[in-house]
Image (cartoon, rainbow, N blue to C red):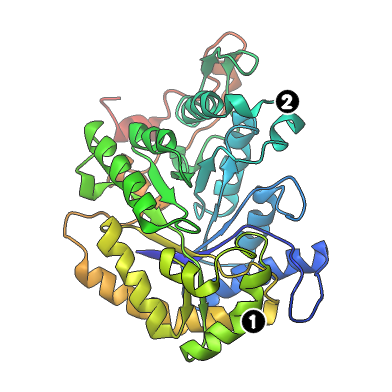
Amino acid sequence: MQFGLFSVSDITRDPVSGETPSEAERIDAVVRIAQHTEEVGMDVFAIGEHHNPPFFSSSPTTLLSHIAATTKRLIVTTATTLITTNDPVRIAEEYAMLQHLSKGRVDLMLGRGNTAPVYPWFGQDIRNGLPLALENYNLLHRLWREDVVDFEGKFRTPLQGFTSVPRPLDDVPPFVWHGSIRTPEIAEQAAFYGNGFFANNIFWPKEHYVRLINFYRQRYAHYGHGTEAQAIVGLGGQAFIAKNSQDAIKQFRPYFNEAPVYGHGPKMEDFMQMTPLSVGSPQEVIDKTLTFREYFGDYQRQLFLMDHAGLPLKTVLEQLDLLGGEVVPVLRKELEAKRAPEVPDAPTHQSLVKAKYGDNPPRQPRPNANRGDNVTGASPYQDSDPAFEASYPAL
């Protein structure tokens, strides 16, 4: 079971101090938050992608490369990468490069994005959001698995004999999650490819996410990737922790009341009852998080949203101390004890390499100009590495 943090990269006024951080301050803060996520013993840090104020994370690979360079074991990922408004060729190349630089400590979460003005900024139409997501991911999937790709679709220029560089580390693509708030079509896409499905598990009642996750599990099994219980599921969640519930509610209330994402609506206590939001003592956050398994079944990744709504860096780091020091260790132990034997661990680069190659050395793609070029459609990579052929005589 993997635990970590995800950030939407909002720059929000602190309603207590009245101060709004600059972009520079917020970017520095997120780097420090990611580093502290590792320091307190958690596994994953995820950053969203946005191209409009009040967010700053327009270039996730740049930010995650820096975070990976300043950490040792943290998995860096996205929450989410826009498969609709990004060119899949650029996604293939940028995340393969990040995979190499991080030595495999990367995966990514793909989503459509639901901000209508963003689409025309990148030459697209939100009314094509779903077909864009389907076509673009089909191309991305192929670019990471085929040395030479011929492609013709509706939404981009054709490719003839195209090779995406660099090739994925160890010739194993980063693991892909598909993230959705409300769209069964994205759950279907995840199930079709045998990828992970991430339900952000914020804002909406549990019944909504139960339907989405159950649908994904059923379709995952339908496509022959395993049983419903073996489907790869990730969940979000929101938490604010203090030593006792009274302090937690008192401290978080002004941030809740003014937060752009859920302020000026239901009062906090009602929101806590209706949604996954946890505001309370470590034990109360533990108890509520453990109910996620009751609703959704065994799952592989739990990410918390904790750096939003204008919370200052000092407070977020204190939250991480409580989360990593008092909450996550109990959740690891409890969820591991309850997990069914057939449920797989969260995929990592190491586990994917093992699944593909067993005990054999992984293929290391090497460009070879003498063996052809991607204008003619021939592979620019060696087909006959002696060590590779010795290990895989049947291939």
How far apart are the two marked residues, 2 and 1, measured between alpha carbons? 40 Å
Q: Which residue is mark 1?
A: 315
Looking at the picture, does residue 327 appear above or below residue 215? below
The reply to whether residue 373 is in sight is no
Front one among 8 and 152: 8
Q: Quadrant of the C terminus?
A: top left
Residue 363: % across, % down: 42, 37
- The location of residue 62, given as percent across then percent down, is 70, 51
- Decide if residue 310 is on the left or right side of residue 231: right
Label 2 crowd (10 A; few <14 / some 14-19 / many >=20): few
Query: Residue 128: horizontal and vertical position, in percent?
Result: 59, 24
Q: How many marks?
A: 2
Task: Check disc 1 and give the amino acid type.
Answer: Thr
Residue 236 - label: none
- For label 1, the SS is helix
Residue type of the residue flagged with mark 2: Gly
Quarter of the image where the N terminus is located: bottom left
| Residue under pointer 2 | 123
Residue at 60% x, 60% y is 68
Front residue (pair 100, 160): 160
300 displayed left or right of 323 = left
- Estimate the x, y position of residue 136 in percent, counting from the top left: 54, 27
Query: Mark 2: which secondary structure?
Result: loop
**Residue at the image point whose x is 16% and y is 59% from the top:** 341
Asked whether the beta carbons under mark 2 and mark 1 sit within 8 Å of each other, the answer is no
